[in-house]
Each structure stands twice: as structure tokens, then as C-alpha cells.
Amino acid sequence: MPKFTWNIDPALLHIGSYELRYYSLIFVAVFLGGHALLRWQIMRGGGEDEDASDFFVYGVLAVLIGSRVGHVIFYDYEKALADPIWILKIWTGGLSSHGAVMGLLFAMWLFTKRRGISYVEGMDRFSFAAALGATLVRIGNFFNSEIVGKVTNQTWGVRFPRFDQNTDAPYRHPSQLYEIVLGLFVLGALYVVDRIAGKEKRPRGLMVSTFFILYFGGRFFIEFFKELQVESIEKAVGLTMGQILSIPCFLLGIFGLIMSLKKRVPVGWYPEDEDEDEDEDDDEEDDERDETSDDEDSEEDEHDEEEKPIKSKLRRQPQAIDKSGVHHDHDADVDEEFSLSEEERRKRTREELKKEDEE
């Protein structure tokens, strides 16, 4: 089994007291890559390029604030109380993926609400970017030698001297690498599900539900190999904080998938009120067609009623017999009837009926 030591300096460059960390560069890749994937999804759904660009600001703030606040609340509140300035030092690490998800959920709600877009539609379009972000962030954790796994049986694993602060550090599960593989798997699964479901023919809510089920379901199992982060809580309940937070997300994904497949609401990046207006227009057009059809039926009935006296009169005409003894079905008067125009025939018929009534 493979085993090696990971002791990389988390800073790529040192400039005086300042340093440029891999973690910071990776976050730039998260934002740029996420924007590209969101733009692809929105424009494919009928939206515009500027929609993805506008959400970029929402997304950056949501990830930075949500993930940092989430880490402070769920994992490191004691350190935050002892050193409040540390909360602002995001580049040193300490960002919660669950906090980032909560921040993004709120940001997408705010963004879609202001534009009249379906909230579920927005989350559906963002699922690819979320999977990419979850993958790249774990690369940053690996460079920072943080969120490490539990100690292995020492026949394999990775040593993290910077985490254990010991040159003879024990071999541990590289849980960051496990989550990188998980993220790539989820990203690939989303692509496959999107194609199988017909891309823009897929039911709304399918993609975000799939992301929640696969990512947080996988995250729950990977947590068994990770070192405890909040021992006071995790030892008491028998689950890690990551598992506790993943359970509701996983269940939300199951619920969303059931509702998505049941309702099968068509996808599309358009205002919800516009969809309602289209339905109303369709109803109005149906009503107009029904009224037109009724008018045409009424005119046909009137025409049939006017034709009946003519046909009746024709049936009463005697058959003419020529010298050869052959019966003819019409005579000169009848020929004259048919040579007249429609209006003249009707007028003549009414006059004849009137005379019959007078007699």
C-alpha cells in the first residue's frame, strides 16, 4: 500500500510579512470555474450572460461569509472567542463546506427572488458549480495540511508533520483526497444525469437533488475516516459534526428528488410570472377559437335551414316525359332555379312561400 510524507509549505510566495497561499489561488479557481459552469447552465436554459455575472458577487460573498461563519459556529467557536481577529484571516484556512452551502442557498434565494426566477431553477443551474467548488476546496485543505484523517495501521497512509507538529508523524487517512475523488464523482454523475434526463427536458429540481444526495451521502461515509474536530459533541453523540450536518442535507435531497420526479415541472430560465402570462394567453386563444367555431356552426345551421324549402320544393316538382318516354328529373323551371344566384334563389323561395301562405 502507498505511503508518503506531505510537508509542503502552504505559501507559494513570501513577500516580507505577506504570503501568497495555494489556498487563495484555489479559491480564485473556484470562483472562475463556478462562474463558467453557471454561465453555461443559465445560457443553455434561455438566460443571459449577465445573469451569471450578476450572481458572481452574490456567490463570492456567500461562500466567504457563509463558510467562515459556519466554521466558527460548528468547529472553532472557542478559538474565535479567544482571538476575534482570527475570524478575518480566511487565507489561513478554516472554512466549512456546510456553511458555504447555507450561504449559497440564501444568496440564490435573494438573487432569484429579485429577478422573479424560480428558486429551485436557480439551485439546479448552480449544482455543477457547487460540485466543482467542493472538489477544489479539498485540494486547498490538502495543501494546508488540515482536515486530516484518522491514524491508519501504519502500513500505508500519509504523514502530515505540519498538522501533528512532529517530524515523526503517524500515517493517516488522506481524507482530503477521498473528498476530492468524491467531488469528481459527483461532478461526473451530474453530467451523466443531465444527459440521460434530456438536458433541457429534465424535470426542475433533479440536478440539485442529485447533488445533495450524492455529495452529502458520500460525505457522511468519508467522515468515518476523518479525525474528530469537535470532540466534546462528537464523542457524546457518536457522530462527527460533518455527519450531523450532512444528514438533513441528504434527506432534503431525497425529498427534492421525489417531488421533482412527481411534479415534473419543465426547466427554463424565465420569470415565473411570465410563465403564468403564457398560460393565460393560451387560455384566451382557446376561448377565441371556441367562439369562432360556435359562430361558424351557427352560420352553417342558418344556411341549412334556408336550403330546406328549396329542396322540398324541388322534390314536389313533377317529372317531365319527353316523346321518347324517358323520365327527366328536372324541367325548365328547375334549370332556371339553379341558374340563379344563391341570394336570388333564397329571395324567390321566400316569395313563393309567402304566396302559398296567402292562398
Image (cartoon, rainbow, N blue to C red):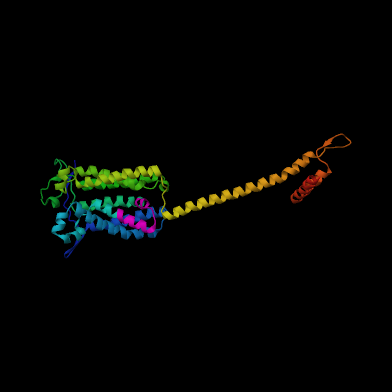
Q: Quadrant of residue 313?
A: top right
x 41%, y 58%: residue: 48
Residue 261's spot in the image, x, y percent?
38, 42
Instruction: Please identify the residue farthest to the right as the structure is shown.
Output: 323
Instruction: Please identify the residue farthest to the front as the structure is shown.
Output: 358
Is residue 19 found left or right of 331 in the rendered image? left
x 21%, y 44%: residue: 223
Q: The N terminus is located in which quarter? A: top left
Is residue 62 found left or right of 75 in the rendered image? right
Q: Nearer the viewer, residue 349 or 11?
A: 349
Check the image and report above or below for 88 versus 351.
below
x 51%, y 50%: residue: 283
Asked whether residue 12 is in view, the answer is no
Could you tell me how many numbered marks the image carries?
0
Residue 190's spot in the image, x, y percent?
34, 46
Q: Is the stretch drawn in magenta largely helix, strand or loop? A: helix
Residue 327's spot in the image, x, y percent?
83, 35
Check the image and report above or below for 278 versus 334.
below
Instruction: Please identify the residue farthest to the bottom as the structure is shown.
Output: 16
Asked whether residue 218 is in view, the answer is yes
Q: Quadrant of residue 22?
A: bottom left
Q: Is residue 12 magenta?
A: no
Q: The C terminus is located in which quarter? A: top right
Question: What span is colored magenta in the figure?
Answer: 105-123
x 19%, y 59%: residue: 87
Residue 47's spot in the image, x, y percent?
41, 56
